[in-house]
Image (spheres, rainbow, N blue to C red):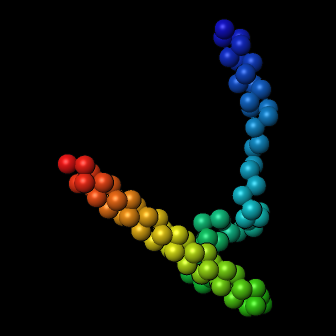
Amino acid sequence: MILRAIFWIAVVAVLMPHEPDLGLGRPSKNESIASQVSTALRAPHTCDGRQVACVALSAIVDRIKASGAKSLAQVKADIEEAEAARRNDSGSKD
């Protein structure tokens, strides 16, 4: 049983990726990921040279938020309507 455990630990160690790709690229020798993130948070440059795409994406996000809010409002109205109908039905049976 111990040999089986050692075997599976070895298999996982061999197959496991050692440096996952987080999409941040490789940091330079002088700069850590923490300093890159703090720099990006202090001065975000999300729309540099891509103002049209940024405005379009912003409009799409706003539409998604609005449709989600409308959907939630509709669900709330449906629940209140069902509760009112249930109260009316239970009141008429007595």
Query: Residue 39 in the image: x percent, y percent?
Result: 61, 77
Residue 10 point in image, percent of width and height? 75, 25
Q: Is residue 44 left or right of residue 76?
A: right
Say if residue 39 shows up in the picture. Answer: no
Q: Quadrant of the N terminus?
A: top right
Q: How many marks?
A: 0
Q: Residue furthest top?
A: 1
Vertically, is 6 above or below 15? above
- Residue drawn at point x = 72 percent, y = 64 percent: 24
Asked if 58 appears above or below 11 in the picture, the reply is: below
Q: Is residue 91 left or right of residue 46?
A: left
Q: Quadrant of residue 65?
A: bottom right
Q: Quadrant of residue 81?
A: bottom left
Camera sees residue 69: yes
Q: Residue at x 23, y 54 (%)?
A: 91
* Residue at x 65% of width, y 65% of height: 33
Residue 26 in the image: above or below residue 17? below
